[in-house]
Amino acid sequence: MREYGGASGNGLRRQFLLAVACLLVGLFFYLIPTGPQQSIASGIRLTLLRPFVDIRSALTAARSIGREADMLRAEVDSLRAWVANNAPAIEENRRLRVLIGLAPLVERSYRAVSVHRPGNLGSQSTIVLDLGSEQGVHALSPVITAEGLAGRVLEAHPSLSIGMDWSHPDFRASVMSEDGELYGIVAPEPATFGGAERLILTGIPYFDVLADGTLVVTSGRGGVYPRGVPVGRVGGLAEVEEGWHRSYWVYPTVHPASVTHALVGVSHGPGPEGEADLSSLFPAGTSPIPDSASEGGPGSAPATDGSG
Amino acid sequence: MAERPLSGTPRLGIGSGAAVALTLILVFFHFVLRLGLGVGAGAPDLLTVALLLHVRRVRSGTAACVGFTLGMLEDAFTLVAFGANTVAMTLVGILGVQTRAFFVSTTSLSFHIVYFVAGKWLRDFIHWILQHAAGVRSGFIEPMVFAAVPAALYAALVGVLIVRLVGPFSESES
């Protein structure tokens, strides 16, 4: 590799052309649509960089075994108590549904998953999950933590999935106030100088006011995120369009950097046209599809417009 | 500063094979720290350090190829502005080669500090511009001053340590 010696005119021209070609190909990759870009990225992720992801998964698993056993035991005990306390209500609900002729509640399907963040420049919104399509994870599967909504899966590989958290510029979710009275859409807002990243809730009617601290949860509309998952708390008025609507700041309940374990929605098999059928994530009665349109029964895939 | 021609056989601080091996080791540790161990910004940007070291002994076409390859690796987990790292590192690679024409005093500490700080900051700056052009809204002061400057100093510290340990990558003054 003695590059200095023998730099003839032809050699210099070849080097110049090679440099220009690399730059142009780089710009080409930068400018092509997201689909082909992610195909290239997937190829690199699943080959050259896969061993590093596996290292991370192994370390996370080892850490979980060692440090988090007590915490997990406490959580399991709490859940056991909660389930015991709510068993009569569940049974009552089941009997009432039979009496009024409703179908049984569909069980939600989730799998526990380890969440990693690559830490490379430009990958701030990227999350890597250690489960993939072999375990039922599909594109659009929601990623949920105990605190609330973390993000969703973008692409699922056989044993690995890539997703985005709520700070991704393309993140949108249909939400409602906790009492179900007001509906809107949340989108991320970049942090101001010295401030934290937050969401902006748009589409609240002008004459309705949300008090600071109001919990905002997913509405289930759009068919991506299940209903009732906490998203954040209202933290002040962002803007008012006189006589039309109000927008509010929402401070998310989940801090993406702190997420190491989560639940990811899984489906029981590929739906029509190869899309994931995530309908099992939605409890009966919250389907975004009107009854008249869902003649295919509970197995019909919900509309997935990407906004959730 | 001098205008010494680049032709002729250089007296290299380390051998070519060792330079390639060191570059590969730095790249490996970059991904072990950032991806494998999840250290994130707590780890130095060894990819840029490896690029800046390597381009001191190759010509512009090869430097662009090295920058392109390392940038593609870095871009693999980028969901927004894919290619921004590739373009940034290719440009930094090409510009890094040009420094040989202007700075001959390649063993001096001050040169290496300025070289690594400027190289790393420029790489972050190009990336920031391309991310901004792709629609990622962020301020300038926080990412480019409060984040990029310490990152550049951190990279310079590691880069200088490596140069001190293994010797300069390009022509020596002696």
Image (spheres, coloured by chain):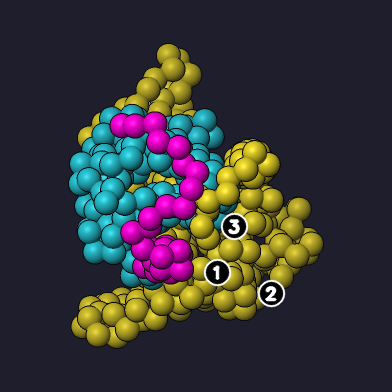
Chain to which mark 2 belongs: A
Numbered tag placed on residue A242 in the rendering: none
Q: Residue at x 69, y 74 (%)?
A: A269
Q: Which mark is residue A41?
A: 3
Q: Give the residue displayed 71% in from the left and 62% down from the top.
A: A275
Residue drawn at x 52%, y 47% is B59
Residue placed most toward the observer, A115 or A150: A115
Give the residue number, with chain letter if any, for mark 1: A48
Q: Position of residue A75 (x, y in %)?
A: 27, 77
Q: Earlier in the sequence, mark 1 or mark 2?
A: 1
Look at the numbered discs 3 and 2 and tell me whether their residues touch, using CB distance below 8 Å: no
Q: Specify the amino acid type for callout 1.
A: Leu
Q: Which residues are magenta?
A: B1-30
Q: Which residue is mark 2?
A: A269
Q: Is there one chain holding both mark 1 and mark 2?
A: yes
Using the numbered discs, state the Cα–Cα distance from disc 1 to disc 2 in whole angstroms.
29 Å
Q: What colour has chain B?
A: cyan
Horizontally, is B57 left or right of A24 in the view? left
Q: Nearer the viewer, mark 1 or mark 3?
A: 1
Which chain comes out yellow in the rendered image? A
Q: Of the residues tagged 1 and 2, which is closer to the observer?
A: 1
